[in-house]
Amino acid sequence: MHTFLYAVLLIPLKRKNVLGTYYLFVEIHISTIMLCSRDIEYIEKEIGRSLSDLEMACFENLWSEHCSYRSTKPLLRTLPTEGENVLLGPGDDAAIVRFSDDIAIAIGMESHNHPSYVDPYDGAATGVGGIVRDIISMGSKPVALMDPLYFGDPEGEKNRYLFEHVVAGVGDYGNCIGVPIVRGELTFDDSYSGNPLVNVVCAGIVHPDKFLTARVKAPKNRLILYGSSTGRDGLGGASFASRDLSEDSESEDRPAVQVGDPYTEKLLIDATLELAETGKILSCRDLGAAGLAGASSEMSSSFGARIAADKVHLREEGMNEIEIMLAESQERMLVEVATSDVAEICAIIEKYDLRWSDIGEVISEKRYIITFHGQVVCDLPVDLLVGGAPEEAWEGTPYSAEKPFIKPPEDLKTLCNMILVHPDVASKDWVKRQYDHDVQLRTVSTEGGCGVLRLGDSALYLSCGCSPRQIYLKPYEGAANAVYENCANLAAMGAEPLCVVNCLNFASPVHEEVFWQIQECIRGMGDMCRKLNTPVVGGNVSLYNESDEFDTRILPTPCIGMAGKGDVRRYEIPKAGMKIGIIGKTRPSFGGSMLDLLTGCGGTAPGIPDVSVLEIVRNLVNSGAVVSATDISKGGLIAALSGFAPLCEIRISGNAFDELFSESYGRFLIAYEDSEKLKDVNIRPLGVVGGDSLLIHTEDCGDIEITKEELSLWVSSTTRLMRF
């Protein structure tokens, strides 16, 4: 390992924690180079000399797992990425998928996991800013965000602190830039203590013929950097994201966390969309992981580039070439422009009170050259730097984690209440109230399993999430079911899936059982996407999610984001007097369930269901035969009832325990008025909406009544977590 200490400085950072607001002075280590000796030997043999300090820093970041996907490239190639509506698949800042004749969707998904542990507010906020810039770099207007979030046990004060400040960071940034947060997921588990997961999906709209790409078009074109000035924040962010968190991460790694400015980002959005409208932006890329070095080298890899680091507009004096090229300061974009168009383009940038710099040009020779005050400080084959990292070969070892089922001793009502008040299942109103869902006036609905936005005469449907505890037990089936469950959320609203993006969050692949999880999850995800004819158009891999401080290793969390299309429809809560029933067969599946989490009952994790029920439900919703529907998943039937029809009277025939708590997939809770419209469908009637409580009659366990007062705990459970 080579370590270079380039600078040390003290910066006052204003932060709010559980004790109030304080100023923290931190020592900033500018760059820690962690290329292994094998990599260095390989690189220096290829170029025939020793690496300069800047070249070493470039390789350390661009060959990191975060940027190069060294451990997962062969697996990712197995995913289905093409489809009739896919205009641009994986490999760019975001994917482009046709929605209609005059609208295409730009969609991407990213993680900001390690930064959100070190500095939860700024880590989460800049995660939102980064994925939004991925969307605008395609010439697309961002219209929606989703935020699947995963935290440690909320009984822990540190975990609650992370939860509160991550939610605030996501909400504040999204609200300030005017992009609605229409969907999310919230999961609590001990495995995320010390390493929360902050995943963000962004969707945007662009004309199918007018989107931008991130690959330069021709030599001699100019490279224009615009937006915020470059400072020392975020140095080493890509390499930081590619290693485990330690007990000292909060102080040592804080400099690797960027600090965002949503007001500048809003100007950047408006300026970039106006620039795209001119038709004179030839390519565009946002500055994210590895900063300017990452953006300019990846953008120019089809040709080459010459960059003058000393031309970059700076926020701080005395920055050296390594700091300038590797800093991950936020709210910056890089565009390719013909020399004759530079004046017009920069005039538009100035109109939005943004700074810009002409930092270099595209060259015909396939080299990546950086100068600093007239001296060449980096001269590398661009193909070696970008995409040249040797793939890592890890061993995967299967394991068996399912335990025999032991029925809990508690009575059914006690078990029902235990599930309903757990924050995974309880109402998320405390979180939702911090997000502006209605900005831009496209949002139709955020309830149920989808966010719904009106786009022309149709609606865009967005769903996200997965079930990590089930995935841990059966990685293949669990990942397949994560895709299925998101598609079920769409089907319950009558929508067809368009595409999938993902964020593959795992612990370190050096553990053989973890690499097996990765292999199996990608295989399961790919197989289910093929069954559903839904391409995987983009995503992100986040490995090394472990904590030395808490001695934890996250559950496998291949989080899914799914976009779909359907008629414009608002999620409807069933009205009093409506009938409710179940479509689909219940199988006793308790492994990895809420019941298993709360009681340790064990059991088998859910198998993969028949996909044909999705089409049945979709058709029933679209025909009007079903007034409202929701899929049955986390928490089983009792959890589905709490959000769908909390006041109702139902009768369960057969095994009430299995019906209430099993989390087998392929089942939907439906509300309907006319039974004749459903005579050809296999439905198990449950009962009627209405009354003063949730009243459940069972054949084998008597009656269960959950009162309004008890149901109110479902509403207030997550809110009560924050009263500390």
Image (spheres, helix red, strand yellow):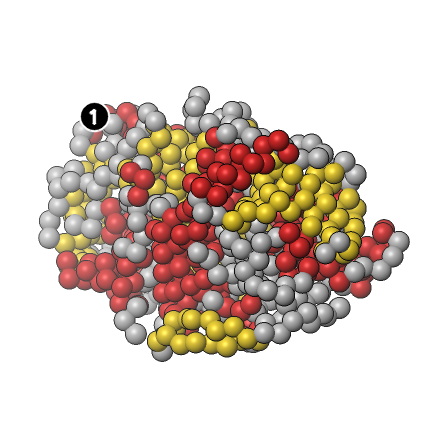
191 lies left or right of 394 = left
The furthest residue to the top: 101
SS category of the residue bearing label 1: helix
Residue 266's x, y, as percent? 41, 47
Residue occupying image coordinates x 16% and y 50%: 647
Q: Amino acid at mark 1?
A: Glu
Total of numbered circles in the picture? 1
Q: Is residue 310 visible?
A: yes
Q: Which residue is mark 1?
A: 676
Res 666 quadrant in image: top left
Q: Is residue 246 visible?
A: no
Residue 203 vs residue 177, the one in the foreground: 177
205 lies left or right of 60 = left
Say which quadrant the N terminus sits in. Answer: bottom right
Residue 384's x, y, as percent? 77, 47
Say which quadrant the C terminus sits in. Answer: bottom left
Residue occupying image coordinates x 36% and y 78%: 19
Residue 59 vs residue 630, the one in the foreground: 59
Position of 444 relative to 708 (above/below):
above
Residue 319 vs residue 640, the one in the foreground: 319
9 lies left or right of 592 = right
Residue 717's x, y, as percent? 27, 63
Residue occupying image coordinates x 75% and y 68%: 2
Res 90 quadrant in image: top right
Residue occupying image coordinates x 81% and y 59%: 51
Residue 635's x, y, as percent? 34, 54
Check disc 1: other Cα within 10 Å, few if <14, some if 14-19, many if 20+: few
